[in-house]
Amino acid sequence: LKLLFKATLHGFTAAAFHQRCDSLSPTVSVGYNASGFVFGGFTTQPFSQSGQYVNDDKAFLFTIRGRNLMKYPVINNPYAVYMVANSGPYFGNALAFFTGNKPVTYSNPGGYYNFTAEEMHGNDLNLTECEVYQV
């Protein structure tokens, strides 16, 4: 694992994320919240600012709670990852880290990855940390 980005060190900004992570792959993105949830996503596709969705049949989301790991595979492959300039890692239209340069998670369970907000992050959308690793 190679740490590419750590929000508390580099800033909770899309610009800092893209400067350090664009064009690198595969990656795992990990979010932490004050409720003790650890959650994130994996993609084989390099991040960019193209404004396009990209296909990745190997993408998945995950949450770790204590000793329990839950994995949520992508269910709509052509929309696995959203390459958007004003956000950190963005998986489908399902889970995004620090949208609008704020330490807040965007969560929309359903059509791209099958998870519940309670399982994923306990409905606590305030990030205390976000890390991106190249694997």
Image (cartoon, helix red, strand yellow):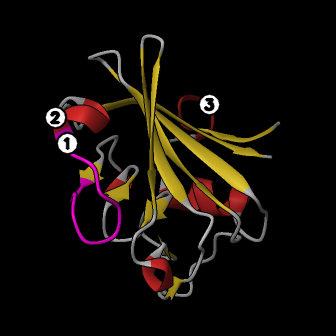
Mark sitting earlier along the chain (3/2): 3
What is the magenta range?
Answer: 107-117
Q: Is residue 75 left or right of residue 9?
A: left
Q: Position of residue 134 (x, y in %)?
A: 78, 48
Q: Label 1 amino acid?
A: Ala
Q: Residues within 10 Å of mark 1 (few under 14, many from 20)?
A: some
Mark sitting earlier along the chain (1/2): 1
Could you tell me which secondary element the residue under label 1 belongs to?
helix
Find disc 1 in the rendering and name its residue: 117
Find disc 3 in the rendering and name its residue: 9
Could you tell me which secondary element the residue under label 2 belongs to?
loop
Residue beneath the point at 48% across and 85% down: 78
Which residue is more in the foreground, 41 or 114? 114
Residue 1 appearing in the image: yes
Find disc 2 in the rendering and name its residue: 123
Q: Is residue 15 magenta?
A: no
